Amino acid sequence: MLSVKENMIVDFSADLLGKFSEVVSRYPEGKQKSALLPILHLVQAEYGWLSVDAMEKVASFLSIEPIEVFEVATFYTMYFLQPQAKYVLEVCRTGPCCLVGAEKIMAHLEDRLGVKEGEATADGLFSWRGVECLAACGYGPVLQIGPSYTFYENLTPENVDILISDLKEKSKSEA
């Protein structure tokens, strides 16, 4: 289900529209809808999430119905339908990872960050969520950190704390 907490009016830059056109050019004439996923990735990279306005403008650019964009954006968990924190910690919550402690890692994240799944910390640095298989069943529990999607295996509460501390330091050095 579409779940947008706030809408964001967007105006795609000429540079971004150029990237859209380059992506569309990879597909046969009349098959511009095939460019939808990579274009949504470009929009999310630019704005951090997919607002209703952004999705409607993507639909207009591709000459498709807005519902076609909404269906795709709500199906794939890689697309964010609400503003996110700077770092999104995604923990695999499927059976193999749960058997080796993924649920403990998620509980630890909730306690350590002081936010529930899907919420952002007050400083805007972190949010976390459980996701489906991250394809590392033999190395669980695992998580990836967006937006760069850095991957971490064999998690413990201690090495999760180190990751969080490292990201805080990285954020300070980028300021």
Image (cartoon, rainbow, N blue to C red):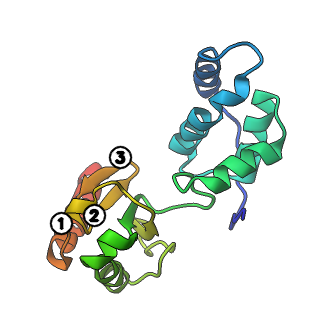
Q: Which residue is mark 1?
A: 154
Q: Which residue is located at x 23 percent, y 53 percent?
A: 173
Position of the N terminus by quadrant: bottom right
Q: Which residue is located at x 57 percent, y 23 percent?
A: 19
The image shows residue 65, relative to residue 122, as above or below, that is above
Q: Earlier in the sequence, mark 1 or mark 2?
A: 2
Q: Nearer the viewer, residue 110 or 170?
A: 110
Q: Which residue is mark 2?
A: 142
Q: Tell me, yes or no, whether the two marked residues, 2 and 3, touch with CB atoms within 8 Å.
A: no
Can residue 146 be seen at all in this image of the molecule? yes
Q: Earlier in the sequence, mark 2 or mark 3?
A: 2
User: Crowdedness of circle 2 by 10 Å Cα count: few (<14), some, many (20+)?
Assistant: many
> SS at mark 2?
loop
Q: Amino acid at mark 3?
A: Ser
Mark 3 against mark 1, which lies toward the viewer?
1
Q: Tell me, yes or no, whether the two marked residues, 1 and 2, touch with CB atoms within 8 Å.
A: yes
> SS at mark 1?
loop
> x%, y% of residue 75?
63, 54
Q: Which residue is mark 3?
A: 148
